[in-house]
């Protein structure tokens, strides 16, 4: 069976969205360093971006339940265009407050875009759900190459004001994505989604599969963000230059997204449970590799393993989540899932620098092992319960 055109369109939209995210990550902290009124506020624009992302996840999911995916995504992209335009004006004027407002809006746009992977499965038969999710996530491969190069190319547009061109490029990316979403066919809410009975969270969370899916997604994402964010600090402490660190991070990003071309097929062949467990094993391998040494190749192999491990846990958990809700519960479950996942990522990014300085590189990695173990145990328990109930 072939994937519908909608899935390919959403994959392209994901590629444009993540390209913008990578471009934004490349320059936001550096801009804060330039225009923030004090050193303590340098990372405030980054923190506000995460708050915007977290804050919009639940409202966006419910908005799409009422108005449909197309309207929801168009609103998200219009917010993105507004945020990028505001950032351009703020940087041109050197206005830090306005720049903080712009990054909050851009975070909201990014949060709405996280629903692309869920939209991809609508209109597909269940057998194609893992492949649809994987293809949308594979858009990150294009972004890993396009994002940094767009940031570099944008510098040439307005050489008089550093980073201004990056936001001109970002405006263009959001306009392109808005046009793309307007053109591709997206499923409207069904009667079952709008009027069906929805169970309360207290009942939904009695499902072992739901608990396992969200836990695997949260822990996989948090472990990946924490180690990835601490890696540049660890490499700098070991005497590596920026070019070496940038290369390691780029390969890590490719490890995060390149497997997406086959992850869906692997899930279809082996099941979500086995792919999540394989991802957790790779996360453990990354931690252990970081215990063996601090050469360039130790960092490189550990970060690639970390990226592939995240890919397997995140896509596997997303696919597993789709088995846990009725049509009317879709917004509730998808919204709370993303809120918890990206909330954990925000906390991990804030803790990374502090834990790196407090605990050191090896210990920071080692304390990830109990969390990964919890994810593996819950996924195994969920699979056991599901298999037993199926036989009953």
Image (cartoon, rainbow, N blue to C red):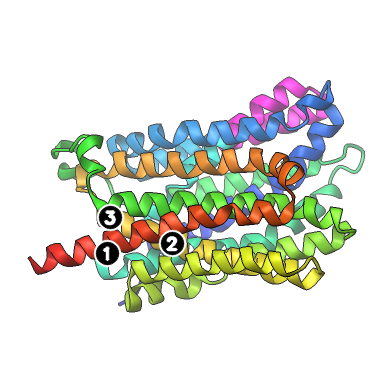
Image quarter (top left, top right, bottom left or bottom right) of the N terminus: bottom left
Answer with mark 3 or mark 1, whichever residue precedes in sequence: 3
Q: Nearer the viewer, residue 294 or 125?
A: 294
Q: Position of residue 307 (x, y in %)?
A: 59, 64
Task: Name the image quarter holding residue 293.
Answer: bottom right
Q: Residues within 10 Å of mark 1 (few under 14, many from 20)?
A: some
- Residue at position x 46%, y 48% from top? 218
Task: Name the image quarter holding residue 81.
Answer: top right
Residue lying furthest left: 392
Read off the residue under disc 2.
315
- Residue at position x 65%, y 29% from top? 102
Q: Main secondary structure of the magenta part?
A: helix
Q: Nearer the viewer, residue 315 or 115?
A: 315
Viewer-side label of 1, 2? 1
Q: Residues under labels 3 and 2: Cα distance?
A: 15 Å
Task: Name the image quarter holding residue 287.
Answer: bottom right
Q: Position of residue 172 (x, y in %)?
A: 65, 46
| Mark linked to residue 209 | 3
Read off the residue under disc 1.
383
- Name the secondary structure under disc 3: helix
Write down the region rendered in magenta. 80-106
């Amino acid at each position: 069976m072939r994937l519908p055109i909608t899935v390919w369109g959403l994959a392209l939209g994901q590629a444009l969205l993540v390209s913008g995210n990578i471009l934004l990550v490349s320059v936001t902290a550096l801009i804060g360093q330039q225009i923030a009124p004090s050193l303590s506020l340098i990372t405030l624009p980054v923190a506000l971006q995460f708050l915007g992302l977290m804050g919009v996840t639940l409202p966006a999911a419910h908005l799409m339940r009422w108005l449909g995916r197309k309207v929801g995504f168009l609103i998200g992209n219009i917010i993105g265009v507004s945020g990028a335009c505001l950032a351009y004006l703020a940087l041109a004027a050197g206005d830090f407050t306005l720049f903080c407002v712009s990054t909050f809006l851009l975070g909201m746009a990014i949060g709405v875009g996280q629903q692309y992977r869920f939209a991809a499965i609508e209109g597909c038969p269940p057998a194609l759900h893992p492949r649809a999710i994987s293809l949308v996530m594979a858009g990150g491969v294009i972004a890993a190459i396009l994002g940094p190069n767009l940031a570099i190319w944008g510098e040439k547009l307005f050489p008089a004001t550093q980073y201004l061109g990056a936001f001109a490029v970002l405006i263009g990316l959001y306009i392109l994505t808005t046009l793309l979403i307007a053109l591709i066919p997206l499923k409207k809410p069904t009667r079952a989604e709008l009027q069906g009975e929805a169970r309360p969270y207290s009942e939904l969370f009695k499902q072992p599969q739901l608990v396992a899916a969200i836990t695997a997604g949260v822990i996989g994402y948090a472990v990946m963000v924490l180690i990835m964010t601490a890696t540049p600090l660890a490499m700098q402490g070991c005497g590596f230059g920026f070019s070496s660190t940038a290369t390691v991070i780029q390969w890590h990003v490719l490890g995060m997204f390149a497997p997406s071309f086959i992850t869906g097929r692997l899930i279809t062949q082996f099941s979500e449970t086995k792919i999540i467990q394989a991802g957790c094993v790779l996360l453990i391998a990354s931690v252990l590799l970081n215990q063996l040494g601090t050469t360039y190749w130790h960092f490189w192999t550990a970060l690639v393993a970390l990226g592939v491990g995240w890919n397997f846990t995140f896509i596997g958990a997303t696919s597993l989540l789709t088995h846990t809700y009725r049509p009317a519960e879709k917004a509730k479950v998808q919204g709370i899932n993303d809120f918890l996942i990206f909330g954990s990522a925000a906390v991990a990014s804030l803790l990374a620098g502090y834990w790196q300085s407090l605990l050191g590189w090896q210990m920071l990695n080692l304390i990830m092992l109990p969390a990964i173990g919890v994810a593996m145990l819950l996924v195994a328990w969920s699979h056991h319960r599901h298999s037993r109930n199926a036989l009953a």
